[in-house]
Image (spheres, rainbow, N blue to C red):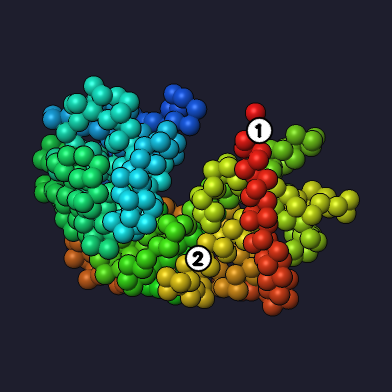
Amino acid sequence: MASRRALIGIDVGTSGTKVLVVDEAGAILARHTESYPLDTPRPGWAEQDPADWWRAVRAGLGAVVAELGAGVDHVGIGLSGQMHGLVALDEADRVIRPAILWNDQRTGRQCAWITERAGGLDGLLALTNNPMLTGYTGGKVVWLREEETGNYARLKRILNPKDHIRLMLTGEHATDVSEASGTGLFDVARRDWSWELVDRLDLPRSILPKAYESHEITGRLRDEIAREFGLPRGLPVMGGGGDAVIQTTGSGLIDPGTAQTIIGTAGIAACALDACAPNPGGRLQVFCNNDPARWHCMGVSMNAGGAFAWLRQTLGAFATDELEFDAMTARAEKVPAGAEGLFFLPYLIGERCPHPDPDARGAFVGLTLRHGAGHLVRAAMEGVVFSIREMLELMRPLGLEATTLRTSGGGTSSPLWRQIQADATGCEVQTVSGAAEGGAYGAALVAGVGAGIWPDLSTAIKGIAVETRTTPDAANRARYDAAFAVYRELYPTLKPRFDAIAALP
């Protein structure tokens, strides 16, 4: 009996690493997840030990290979992972300090300095097509130079989290173009490092890894790793992609015309672009796509499911029993679309997109004695979706005219939240197979292209099946259009008050 050809996808996430194996039809054969801690040594800081990632990857590889046993011919490995994190290495590839993660906020001053050195925001956008956000890698390198001079003196290479795992697997210093886009040091239009910006910042060019397209072979499995897990000698490891990009590939989002929404802790709206469109004002993020002929545009709202979790905790403090997700959405379902004039701004920890404002505040607007707990829940769900709609509308000048949304994340397990998305955007909302697997599934598909299983990503995603479809309700659509016209004026109206609140002693 002939062996089945299979692909390994590895996703190095913030809370854990997932390793899965898929076959030539895109079916999942095995999966394993290992968790690890996150350290917050100071308020606003977030760090991890890269050794924890490597232990998790080894455990995951061992588990899936043992589960499948003989009869599987592994032909490639694809990598995905949390983006923007800084892994600082010395000349012997030893980790100098704990990795500084994507959600670390220590680099505000350094990001402002980088923007100034680039000639202001417009100058920076001309070089990279992206602002230098506090989560990005570039600000972290400058912070290291300013705040940990001894560690910076030892610095010889920088990598992002998944690329550190690549180094451990292959011995190669490499990244992919989607990951490199999120460093803030990458010329997204040219799909190469912005050497002009790197030079302006007085950073050594030699610290940056070579950037490959996602499907390209970046190295091969080291002999000792192959022996340890019983994997083929010389097994190719492909470029893969940053999780924010490659998880859209795993949802089958390749062609313009379909957008992805994610309601996780944060809210994300994303789409594919045929060309690298300008990013006016830097309000969006424009990255290289996993498809070498396309680009990826997205907006990230800081609070989506996180706002719902806050509301659950707050209302639960007054309940005799813990409020469950389904119980809360059941209350919201009894409230008509528009929550009878109640609005919610989900800016509980400031905002990144659609309004880049760290001083923005959350708010319920329009409360009356008629409104109860169900109204609060429904307004919160609608506020998250209105924020996503604002991000989708920001993408229209870049060429997005979506008629379909593919949605994922914990929040979209709720049929009501999917219906609100459909009604508020006028798009059919779909859930698809593989989306729940995060970046690991997309990484496996990308590896399949590199290994010759599929000629391109458009072919690779054909095995992704639509599992649910939610179509807009015409009456609710009209209500939401009217409500959205009010909602989008709330932030500019309240911004002066938000600024005043932030300035209070």
User: Does dot 2 land on a helix, a strand or a loop?
Assistant: helix
Residue most extreme to the top: 150
In this view, 51 is above or below 251: above
- On the image, the x and y values in percent for residue 352 come to 50, 50
Image depth: mark 2 or mark 1 in front? 1
Residue 99 figure quarter = top left
In the image, 178 versus 32, the foreground residue is 178
Point out which mark residue 504 bears: 1
- On the image, the x and y values in percent for residue 53 come to 32, 35
In this view, 350 is above or below 217: above
**How many circles with numbers are drawn on the protein?**
2
User: Which amino acid lies under the numbered mark 1 shown in the image of this protein?
Assistant: Leu
In the image, 278 versus 349, the foreground residue is 278
Residue 427 figure quarter = bottom right
- Residue under the point 33% across and 43% down: 114
- On the image, the x and y values in percent for residue 300 come to 48, 53
Q: Quadrant of the C terminus?
A: top right
Taking the image as drawn, is residue 254 in sight? no
For marks 2 and 1, the one nearer the N-term is: 2
User: Which amino acid lies under the numbered mark 2 shown in the image of this protein?
Assistant: Leu
Check disc 1: other Cα within 10 Å, few if <14, some if 14-19, many if 20+.
few
Q: Which residue is mark 2?
A: 394
